[in-house]
Amino acid sequence: MNLDQAARDETIRYHEDFYATHKLFEDGWLQEPDEELPGIISLLASVKEPRVLDLGCGVGRNAIAIAQALKSNRVRIDCFDMLDSAIERLSAYASQFKVKEEICATCVDMDSLTIEPNSYDAVLAISILEHGKSIQSIKRILGEIVDGTKSGGINRILISADRKATARDTGKPVDTKVETPMTHQEARELLEQTYSAWSIDKLELAPYREELDLAGQRVIWTCTSVSFLARKS
């Protein structure tokens, strides 16, 4: 299936605008790392020279927090994002927060991603999988993540499902695009099937709401966050 270019353009436009107007650890959803990060850091604290993959890393709200916490463990974090501008900002933040040596940031098209098997102690894929070009591509990427995780390693995944937008002033529906839209049922089943041989620590659904600019107007954007955490046997 071909990529929905209009959806990809909307993804790029939103993130480039957000990163240009919000500062890391200060504004919006960049203010804090992912809620599961403290537990992941605690698990990695006993690992010598842990390797982490942050897929869809953005400007580093998770990668930099991990690097700061595990610097003494000689952690290495491979950070992949499709936006050159995000990688540039991540590199600048890594220097600012003095974790440049711990972070390797690369611009990567997720749909062509390959991961060396048995490479990572933790893999993060937070609000990124739905931006794959098709469900077949997402399944392939998840297979790469599963194979690329070491025994005992942990995967943290967050998927935005059931995406909707309404005009703030009128309440009328506004078209919002994503490369591969999923319902929360579809996302949940995909994760349960992919990780059937793993220990699933968390699979929860939660509503999410954000006010943002879309198609030249202010909208209320909502979704169901499918929050997932699992460990490899």
Image (cartoon, rainbow, N blue to C red):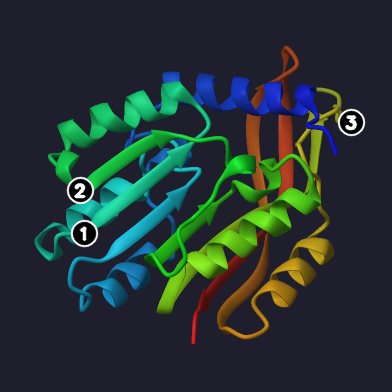
Residue drawn at point x = 85 percent, y = 27 percent: 174
Pointer 3: what residue? 173
Q: Position of residue 61 (x, y in %)?
A: 36, 44
* Pick the front one: 183 or 135: 135
Which of the marked residues, 1 or 3, is nearer the chain's N terminus? Answer: 1
> Residue 18 appears at what percent x and percent y?
50, 25
Please state which of the two labelled residues, at mark 2 or mark 3, is closer to the viewer. Answer: 2
The residue positioned 69% from the left and 21% from the top of the image is 9
Local secondary structure at mark 1: loop
Residue identified by numbered label 2:
102
Q: What residue type is labelled 3?
A: Pro
Secondary element type, mark 2:
helix
The residue located at (79%, 71%) in the rendering is 189
226 in relation to 211, above or below: below
Q: Mark number for residue 75? A: 1
Q: Can residue 207 be seen in this view?
A: no
Using the numbered discs, state the Cα–Cα distance from disc 1 to disc 3 in whole angstroms: 45 Å
Check contact, mark 2 vs mark 3: CB within 8 A.
no
